[in-house]
């Protein structure tokens, strides 16, 4: 069999332990075994380094992504709170974690009071990412016929669609509606045509225990339906009913 003289100084981890003699002779098979052993070792080392590198990158990427998501969430919260506080409008529904709604009924308003107030109104409390926004949004409601005229002066597709649907079904005598009134840098409170609220079937029974009325809030192209209402907490000067909307859990 052919053989080769190989100095051990050229091999870091020989597969076959050589003798301490410099004239050790290795067979071709021993050399092949050694090379194969080294190839496996190098391959394993390279694989380990790749896996460690990928894992390290993944952890860093996940950390950066989580940080970015937190920053985006905070930005949306601040932006949405700004919309409520500075403009008197609802923020985008995607930023809202809950909305509470108080239904106020004031049947004993005098003619003079009715110039600026309504027998029916809604007060919305907004929660963004679990935190309550300080400013609340009040919507003055009008009988359907009067509301329809107001809405058509500030038309947006979704609100007008609902107005026409209520009109077609002959449900106008059961519904009241109102538009959000935003803030400006002046003294005016302009209507926000894309944000409206509807209160339906509320006049059948106005006792605190009544449960037939329902509330629909329109924000842009999104419609939010509020859950069953309950008697509002408080005395005679408090709201009549209270209900909530929360996004569906994925």
Image (cartoon, rainbow, N blue to C red):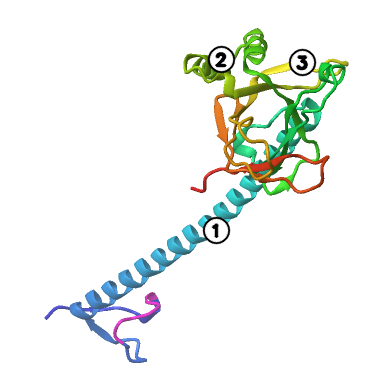
For the N terminus, the image quarter is bottom left
Question: How far apart are the two marked residues, 2 and 1, measured between alpha carbons?
Answer: 50 Å
Residue at the image position 66 percent from the left and 18 percent from the top: 143
Is tag 2's residue or tag 1's residue first in the polypeptide sequence? 1
Residue where numbered disc 3 is placed: 190
Residue at the image position 68 percent from the left and 40 percent from the top: 207
Vertical placement of 159 versus 59: above or below? above
- Nearest the viewer among 6 and 142 is 142
Magenta region: which residues? Answer: 10-16
Residue where numbered disc 1 is placed: 59
Q: 10 Å neighbourhood of mark 1: few (<14), some, or many (≥20)?
A: few
Residue where numbered disc 2 is placed: 160
Question: How far apart are the two marked residues, 3 and 2, measured between alpha carbons?
Answer: 18 Å
Main SS class of the magenta portion in the image = loop
Mark toward the viewer: 2 or 1: 2
Mark toward the viewer: 1 or 3: 3
Is tag 1's residue or tag 3's residue first in the polypeptide sequence? 1
Residue at the image position 76 percent from the left and 30 percent from the top: 138
Query: Which secondary structure lies at badge 2?
Result: helix
Measured as percent of width and height from the top left, residue 216 is found at 59, 31
Residue at the image position 48 percent from the left and 64 percent from the top: 52
Left or right placement of residue 151 versus residue 222 in this view? right
Left or right placement of residue 122 versus residue 10 in this view? right
């Amino acid at each position: 069999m052919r053989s080769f003289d190989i100095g051990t100084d050229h091999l870091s981890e020989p597969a076959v332990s050589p003798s301490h003699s410099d004239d050790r002779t290795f067979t071709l098979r021993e050399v092949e075994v050694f090379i194969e052993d080294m190839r496996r070792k190098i391959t394993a080392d390279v694989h380990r380094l790749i896996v460690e590198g990928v894992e390290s990158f993944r952890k860093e990427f996940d950390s950066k992504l989580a940080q970015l998501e937190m920053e985006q969430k905070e930005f949306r919260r601040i932006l949405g709170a700004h919309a409520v506080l500075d403009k008197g409008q609802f923020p985008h529904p995607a930023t809202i974690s809950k909305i509470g709604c108080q239904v106020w009924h004031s049947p004993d308003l005098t003619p003079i009071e009715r110039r600026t107030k309504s027998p029916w109104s809604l007060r919305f409390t907004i929660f963004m990412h679990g935190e309550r926004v300080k400013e609340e949004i009040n919507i003055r409601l009008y009988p359907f016929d009067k509301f329809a005229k107001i809405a058509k002066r500030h038309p947006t597709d979704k609100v007008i669609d609902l107005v026409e649907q209520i009109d077609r079904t002959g449900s106008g005598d059961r519904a009241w509606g109102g538009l959000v009134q935003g803030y400006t840098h002046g003294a005016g409170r302009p209507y926000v045509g894309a944000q409206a609220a509807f209160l339906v079937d509320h006049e059948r029974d106005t006792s605190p225990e009544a449960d037939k009325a329902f509330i629909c809030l329109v924000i842009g192209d999104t419609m939010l339906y509020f859950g069953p209402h309950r008697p509002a907490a408080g005395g005679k000067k408090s709201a009549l009913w209270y209900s909530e909307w929360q996004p569906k859990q994925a």
